[in-house]
Image (cartoon, helix red, strand yellow):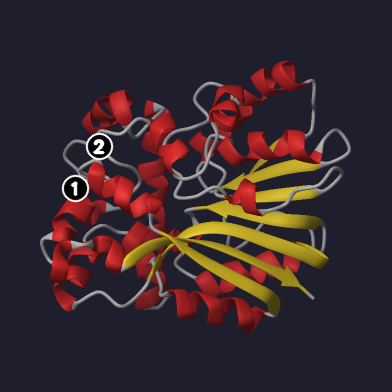
Amino acid sequence: MNESNQTNDRVRAQIRDGYAQIAEAGVFVGEGATATREKLAGRTAQEGCCGGGSCCGPTTIGVDELAEQIGYSTDELEALPGGANMGLSCGNPTAIAALREGETVLDLGSGGGFDVFLAGPRVGASGRSIGVDMTAEMVSKARANTEQYRKATGLDNVEFRLGEIENLPVADASVDVVISNCVLNLSTDKARAWGEIFRVLKPGGRVAVSDIALLKELPDSAKQTVEDWVGCVAGAVTVETMRAQLEAVGFGDIEMTPKQDYVRAMMAAGDPLYVKLAGLLEGGDPSAYITSVDVVARKA
């Protein structure tokens, strides 16, 4: 195994471990954040995403408050099973996916089932809402939430699978829509991940993703800082690079919409990574460099 593969495997293991601990604690923002941080005590920022600080959520803002700031409605949040929202979103892909009755939708990095449970009623009893996550603890948490979802909606149309987004446990051309929420930036092989998305989509199928991207390259001093926070911003590519990755695997009708709500919410909440970056960037404004971005595209 070459050095690059070893590094990617190490990063993937660190991210998996960080999210396993978030699943165990139940939340990474708001009132529950203290317990989570205590579980992560002793880990340095170099030990992985979510280690030593928040690259996955702010320190003071509540999970529902954050979700509302990035586009979820109060009604949507109140309909969710308890614990499905852990403050790990940076956008609302279900809002841009234009889901229809009878469709099969696949959520990459589904966590506790947040977007899977929101998509389920939209595709209805004749549709299917599937979540894939590489963290066993997240899959277990989502599956535990499924019974509450069934009772609340009367639907039995969701499922959760353990797997990596670079090697999806999903058949070729079997999905109408792929969604994802702040996950692709964590991938150590984004080209392969986009290729997998293309593979599992039916002809004419579409992708609707909210993710973290760069509006312009960070200066060297800031790059070193984000590299110390493995994943999240450290894994983000420019909007232009992301577009090129989609085009390279065959996607068309690509629309990319940068949105600053997420980064500004992180700053207002005193997220330690963004606060540190503010001190390193000209103008002190991370939102001039970092953005959440809504991406929609279609498989020809």
User: Compared with residue 26, is residue 264 higher up or lower down, i.e. above or below?
Assistant: below
In the image, what residue occupies the spot 59% across and 36% down? Answer: 113
Q: Is residue 82 left or right of residue 56?
A: right
Residue 176, given in percent of the width and then of the height, sits at 79, 56
| Image quadrant assignment for residue 177 | bottom right
Determine whether the residue tagged by mark 1 lies in a helix, strand or loop: helix
- Which of marks 2 and 1 precedes in the sequence? 2
What residue sits right under mark 2 in the picture? 59
Specify the label residue 272 is tagged with: 1
In the image, what residue occupies the spot 58% across and 67% down? Answer: 193
Residue 68, given in percent of the width and then of the height, sits at 46, 37
Q: Amino acid at mark 2?
A: Thr
- Local crowd size for mark 1, using a 10 Å CA cut-off: few (<14), some (14–19), many (≥20): some
Q: How many marks?
A: 2
Residue nearer the viewer, 208 or 34? 208
State how far apart marks 1 and 2 are (Cα): 8 Å
| Image quadrant assignment for residue 155 | top right
Task: Check the picture and name the quadrant holding the N terminus.
Answer: bottom left
Query: Is residue 231 at all visible to an observer of this figure?
Result: no
Residue nearer the viewer, 18 or 175? 175
In the image, what residue occupies the spot 50% across and 74% down? Answer: 242
Q: Is residue 291 left or right of residue 228?
A: right
Residue nearer the viewer, 129 or 19? 129
Residue 2, given in percent of the width and then of the height, sits at 39, 78
Task: Check the picture and name the quadrant holding the C terminus.
Answer: bottom right
Query: Is residue 111 at all visible to an observer of this figure?
Result: yes
Asked if marks 1 and 2 touch (Cβ < 8 Å), the reply is yes
Determine whether the residue tagged by mark 2 lies in a helix, strand or loop: loop
